[in-house]
Image (tube, helix red, strand yellow):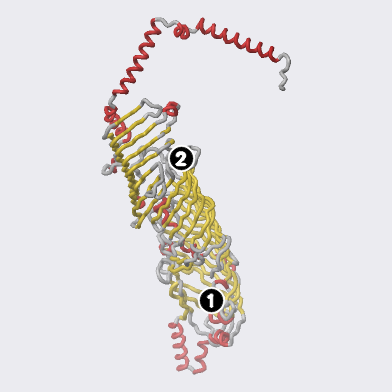
Amino acid sequence: MLKIPSGWRERTGVAMATTRARAQACHARIAAYDPVYRGFRHPGRAEKVAASVSLVLIAAIVVFLLVFDWNWLRGPIGRWASAEYDREIAIQGDLDVRPFSWTPTVIVNDLKFGGPDWARERDTAQVGRIEARFRLRTLLAGRIELPLLAITRPDVVLISTEDGRQSWDLDPDRPDKGEGLNLPLINRLIIEEGQLVLEARERDLTLDAGVSAQEFTTADNGGAGFLLAGQGEINGSPLTLRISGGPLVNIRRDRPYRFEARLEGARSRLVVDGAITRPFDLGRFTSTLRLEGQDLNDLYLLTGVTLPNTPPYRLSGALARDDSVWTLNEVAGRVGASDLSGDVRIEGGERLRVDANLASRRLDLDDLMAILGAQTRTNAAGTETTTVASGAGPGRLLPDATLQVDRLRTMDGSLTYRAASVKANDLEIRTVRLGAKLEDGLLDLDPVAFAFSRGELNGTARINATRDTPYSAIDFRLAGYPLESIIPLRGGVAPLSGIALGRARLEGPGASIHTFAGGSRGSLSLVVPRGELRTAFAELLGINASAGLTRLLRGDQSRSTIRCGVADFDVSGGVARARTLVVDTDVVLARGSGSINLGNETLNLRIDGDSKRPRLLRLWTPITVRGSLSQPRVGVDVGSTLAQGGVVGALAAVVAPIAALFAFVDPGLAEDADCGALIAGAR
């Protein structure tokens, strides 16, 4: 049994008596000094008059609300709204207000919501009937909650233009922060016979969709309580959209609302399966996104995000929205025959910004060529991509895919990309690193880095896309690249070995790589500081018939030292003219001249060789390199050979047949080139 401590009752009684005494003293002070209290306890004439007037006013207001014809307010409301939002707004049917309820109701019939000045020909909205019920308790607390919102026959037309105007924007002067629509809580949303027309002229997109929201699921709407489904066109190709969700009945803010969305068009398919974190706060949701298509560049028409050209792709990730910020995390999938993973962050507002951090475990180099405009083909299994054509026509190397400068000007952003390994390729590229930054139409590529099995290529590029015709500048350096990778093996042996150093500095206008190169100016240089060359080829470099042909015929594999090789070109108007063209070996010193036309991708080079050793049969004729860059033709200057033959004939006729042989004798007086000065002079 619970034992009560001694003295507890006494102490409790004392405390209660003290409390009662204090309350009685407070009441006595109020009764003695508070006039309001005295007025209520003993009302005088003034208090009675005030109370009577108040009751009469309340009764009058109630009677007024009961008999008032709310249609009298249609005109004033329409005129005020039209002036406020600079468009025609009118309630053309009855206006009914039912205020005497815990859920006051407003019913609007035949609402017209016109378009702005530039779109007067089509109303933004025509609604047959709107019934809205408000929860009085939360309304008095300053928060709107709708137990019911029923909309009948809404016909909505949304138009956007190339210059960014939107027909549904009621305050076009307000900066666009990219935030989503935040609606009040709606316990029951009913939409009947709804129609939505979207016309996005800047993307050549049209959509005509039906909208319905029911309190239950039916077979007609595919088991969805909410359904928006329609068809249209985008850039001349079919477009379909379907958004569905559960019934909008007894939705709570602390319970996510699930939805599914599917969008197909522009050779692309996007599927979203997600949930609105707080129902009717459309600025926040989480979902999974699956997208696939023929070219990531096509997604610009659907999303407004500028992406590069790619082979067919299939990607997925976790898509989330937090007001103006969209994130696509844990990206996984394939682009062409290459895997791709990473994270993307998109921030909306007046100017779109996209930041991406992407990587590939294994890159197919042909997939990267598609970004430059090459035409590629990926097999059905997605395991191999091949380059079909450069995009600049048969026999051309430089792509002519046009850079879409208007799209680059619409957004800012950054990109980091790394390929940890590269599928086996002729160039022996092992890893790739790319970085890009786009700000106000200026695109900086830094770095552009390719690591080979030996050596590397590093560079930067800047593209000024603020002009209708972009202006670009590039600076690329080649370091330690093996010559064996350039010249194919002959008989299992590399005819040429050594390392190559090079640099390309070019700038000029052009919307494609091909047109840029064809109008560029700057310099091109290639240096071989030291190497080896098969002696037979070294002799033939000087057209030494006796030594060179003899060594070739007997299969001589002996090597000659390349003391240095320097090719330095000045580029102007897309034509690279040789400033220095020298190959110095221990047996032959070769000097060249000529040009390379980057516009039509042709060569016209001439190489004259001088022997450093006496030779009996030496043809005094230069080597020529002509034709296209993709298939150069190596030959000899026939005119010089004929001239040498003419000298032989004259000597034979005038002196003696034996004397004619001196025309083929080379005393071998060529000296070593100053390799240090030549290499230092190359740019």
Q: Of the numbered discs in the image, which one, if any, rests on residue 165? A: none
Q: Position of residue 527 (x, y in %)?
A: 56, 68
In the foreground, 441 or 223 = 223
Does 505 sit above or below residue 47?
A: below
User: Where's the N terminus, which quadrant?
Assistant: top right
Q: Position of residue 13 (x, y in %)?
A: 66, 12
Q: Could you give the CA–CA distance between mark 2 and mark 1, rounded to whole angstroms?
A: 79 Å
Q: Amino acid at mark 1?
A: Ala
Q: What residue sits 48% from the left and 64% below the top? A: 369
Residue beneath disc 1: 590
Vertical comparison of 328 with 588: above or below: above
- Residue at x 32%, y 44% (from the top left corner): 193
Q: Vertically, is 580 above or below 40?
A: below
Residue shown at the point (36%, 34%) measured from the top left: 132
Observer-nearest of 493 and 467: 493
- Nearer the observer, 72 or 396: 72
Where residue 396 appears, as percent x and y from the top left, is: 43, 69
Identify the residue at the far front of this view: 1
**Residue 678 visible in rendering:** no
Q: What SS does tag 1 mark?
A: strand
Of callouts 2 and 1, the N-terminal one: 2
422 with respect to 133 (left or right) = right
**What is the tally of numbered marks visible in this picture?**
2
Query: 10 Å neighbourhood of mark 1: few (<14), some, or many (≥20)?
Result: many
Instruction: From the image, tell me which residue sits under label 2.
Output: 279
- Give the answer, above or below, for where 585 lies relative to 263: below
Q: Which amino acid lies under the numbered mark 2 shown in the image of this protein?
A: Pro
The answer to whether one can see residue 618 in this image is: yes
Give percent across and percent down for residue 98: 34, 28
